[in-house]
Amino acid sequence: MSPHVLVLGGTTEARRLAAELAARPGVRVTTSLAGRVTRPGAVDGEVRIGGFGGAEGLACWLRERQVHAVVDATHPFAAGITAGAVRAAAETGLPLVVLRRPGWHAGPGDHWHPVPSLDAAARALPGLGRRVFLSTGRLGLAAFAHLRELHFVVRSVEPPEPPMPPDAQVILARGPFTVADESALLREHRIDVIVTKDSGGEATAAKLTAARRLGLPVVVVRRPPLPDGVTAVADVAGALERLGAGLPGMPVSRPSDSAAADRCP
């Protein structure tokens, strides 16, 4: 039986990992996408779209599809998916690798205001400026909906979900972005303050450099912690190594629980 790896994807790192695995003779890779983006990029190997129905549903899927290892390469803020993957891996006895790109770090000249949540970011804004560049994705804008005195420029890949701030302009765009582009956007919209999640990576980091050069404050929402006892690798090479350097000779034995499989929805 060929080793079968499930990649919980949706990130650049997930696509790169799927390509590496798919290129290895005898290895089967399936990438699962949540379906929140209508036009996801091309992914090597097999692709499934949609949720599993929680940790129990994921565990059933792993048994039925005879998966040998799971890689959680989702967005650093997809805490619910990670928690479900941890529980499903524990239930099935499968190895789980968590792949997380490194977060951003403030440097000389940066004016960062770290906060624990979007709600905390909203509370910090009135004292930092009136014109806000909101780069936190299309979800969670409800946290800012009550800020009627502020003007928001909201950028996301897909149209944001309501409720939204009443005075908001939406820009639909997908990174990577250049420092020149970000600087021009911030100047054009006369931005006073930026709000972003600590997503890490290069695709959207240019706004931080632009903010530094323009002397703008940045409210940075910290990442949720990983579940207890879980450590992450920082790149695709680390994920491949933790998968067991044995690819394609990954052990093909895996827990079998036909009774549990019969209970799958």
Image (cartoon, rainbow, N blue to C red):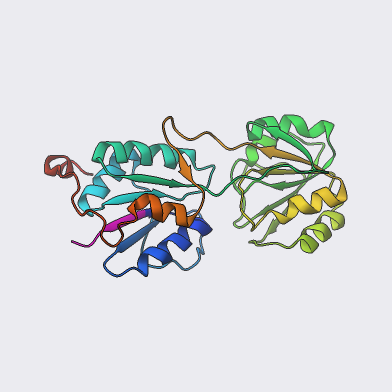
Across and down, in percent, residue 135 comes to 69, 48
Q: Relative to 46, is 155 on the left or the right?
A: right
Picture quadrant of residue 88? top left
Across and down, in percent, residue 174 comes to 63, 61
Task: Give the position of the C terminus as an image quadrant.
Answer: top left
Across and down, in percent, residue 106 comes to 73, 42
Which residue is at a point 80% across and 49% down the rendered structure image? 211
Which residue is at a point 78% across and 36% down the rendered structure image? 148
Which residue is at a point 44% across and 60% down the rendered structure image? 17
**187 over 52 or under it: above or below:** below
Residue 50 in view here: no
Residue 123 in view here: yes
Residue 158 counted in the magenta span: no
Q: How many marks?
A: 0
* Residues drawn in magenta: 1-6
**32 over 224 or under it: above or below:** below
Across and down, in percent, residue 55 comes to 33, 39
Q: Relative to 65, is 104 on the left or the right?
A: right
Task: Give the position of the N terminus as an image quadrant.
Answer: bottom left
Between 85 and 20, the one nearer to me in the picture: 20
Picture quadrant of residue 149? top right
Which residue is at a point 50% across and 63% down the rendered structure image? 40
Between 245 and 31, the one nearer to me in the picture: 245
Between 246 and 29, the one nearer to me in the picture: 246
